[in-house]
Image: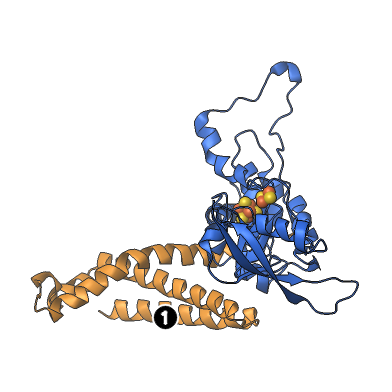
């Protein structure tokens, strides 16, 4: 195992004492196979205990360690140091207000997530004795990829449209709505459409595609949004050109 | 929240994008052929004129031109928005009027052939 000194340039901001964020340099002795999160942990343990950041699982499942690494939204626990040369710049996720150091305020995302009702709204009520709702592998395949989202918000940091228009519901929340819409057991699509087929919903998206590029779980949120656009267009024609057709 | 009315223009945009993506390479190729001295009989002026003269040819050409123009108009609207032009209403009126004018012109010239 070889060691190397990594220069980290970390954004610092303490709302109690600072008026402006600033950068702080750390020289961190690192193992070659470390990820950026290991380097941050080393800073916190042995160099500067005041550094704040979020993390939990260290294995790309909890979604809490998202940050900008050299300007790109990444999971710090999946960003290998060997892939970087020179000074590594670490900043909080773009497009979110900073709470402290690398910790952001994520209320906006959480509120939007709630708005799209990301849970199963059963088509029909069924007594427990009736047994489980059955689903074929083909029906599972329709939405499985969208269940993989870990709510890391990298896609929001990557999305220029969200940066420009903060009221845009955004990639992950809309993809999660799609996940339930595509579920054969679900009957809540019309309720979700009220949010996601609005101007602040899928129609704010101009298909830049950055969300799908940065998504660590290969959810392909951009794909979900385009599918929703097609279905909402079909809806629109049904509702306006053929008002007699009831879905 | 109210559902958006953008599907009207987006439907034309998506259909136009698909048509354009398929046709542009073919058009580029066909334009390059004469440059390399290949001039298929099929593309001779009289043949193309006869194609545009038939009512089915007119219909095909009109459909393609209409979709391409509405695609371009909507693309321009979104691009301007991405560049920070916030007067979306005015931009929409301008680009869609241009597409409508183009559509009418296409119909007029096709009908004259
Ligand atoms: S869609 Fe991908 S990038 Fe966006 S929050 Fe979910 S896992 Fe993260
Ligand atoms: S620490 Fe859980 S995703 Fe990185």
Task: Please identify the quarter of the rendering in which residue A163 is found.
Answer: bottom right
Q: Position of residue A57 (x, y in %)?
A: 69, 45
Q: Which chain: orange?
A: B
Name the residue at 58% across, 28% down: A135
- Residue A151 versus residue A9: which sits nearer the camera? A9
Residue at the limit of the structure toward the right, as seen here: A16
Left or right, A117 with reference to A80: right
Looking at the image, which residue is at 75% across and 64% down?
A102
Taking A166 as reference, is B89 above or below it? below
Tell me where residue A233 sits by quadrant.
Answer: bottom right
Please say if B84 is above or below B61. below
In the visual, does B25 lie left or right of A201? left
Label 1 crowd bin: few (<14), some (14–19), many (20+), radius 10 Å: some
| Residue B85 spot, x, y in % from top left | 62, 83
Q: Is residue A204 visible?
A: no
- Residue at point 91%, 72% (across, down): A16
Q: Is residue A141 above or below residue A178?
A: above
Residue B93's quadrant in the figure?
A: bottom right
Q: Colour of chain A?
A: blue
């Amino acid at each position: 195992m070889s060691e190397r000194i990594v220069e980290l340039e970390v954004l610092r901001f303490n709302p109690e004492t600072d008026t402006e964020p600033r950068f702080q340099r750390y020289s961190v002795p690192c193992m070659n196979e470390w990820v950026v999160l290991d380097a941050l942990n080393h800073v916190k343990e042995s160099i500067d205990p005041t550094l704040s950041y979020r993390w939990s699982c260290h294995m790309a499942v909890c979604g809490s360690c998202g940050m900008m690494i050299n300007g790109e939204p990444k999971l710090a626990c999946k960003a290998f140091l060997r892939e970087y040369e020179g000074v590594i710049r670490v900043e909080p996720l773009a497009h979110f207000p900073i709470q402290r150091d690398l910790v952001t305020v994520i209320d906006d995302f959480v509120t939007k997530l709630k708005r799209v009702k990301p849970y199963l709204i059963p088509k029909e009520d069924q007594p427990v004795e009736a047994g489980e709702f059955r689903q074929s592998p083909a029906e599972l395949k329709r939405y499985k990829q969208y269940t993989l989202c870990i709510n890391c918000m990298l896609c929001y940091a990557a999305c220029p449209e969200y940066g420009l228009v903060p009221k845009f519901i955004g990639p992950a929340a809309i993809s999660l709505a799609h996940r339930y819409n595509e579920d054969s057991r679900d009957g809540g699509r019309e309720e979700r459409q009220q949010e996601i087929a609005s101007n602040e919903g899928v129609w704010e998206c101009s298909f830049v595609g950055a969300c799908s590029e940065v998504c660590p779980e290969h959810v392909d949120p951009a794909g979900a949004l385009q599918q929703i656009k097609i279905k909402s267009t079909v809806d629109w024609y049904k509702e306006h050109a053929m008002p007699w057709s009831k879905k | 929240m109210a559902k958006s009315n953008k599907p009207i223009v987006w439907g034309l945009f998506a259909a136009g994008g698909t048509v354009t993506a398929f046709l542009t390479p073919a058009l580029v190729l066909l334009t390059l052929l004469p440059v390399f001295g290949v001039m298929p009989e099929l593309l001779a002026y009289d043949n193309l004129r006869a194609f545009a003269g038939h009512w089915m040819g007119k219909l095909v050409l009109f459909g393609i031109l209409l979709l391409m123009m509405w695609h371009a108009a909507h693309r321009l609207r979104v691009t301007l928005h991405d560049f920070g032009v916030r007067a979306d209403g005015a931009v929409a009126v301008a680009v869609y009027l241009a597409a409508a004018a183009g559509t009418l012109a296409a119909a007029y010239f096709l009908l004259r052939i």
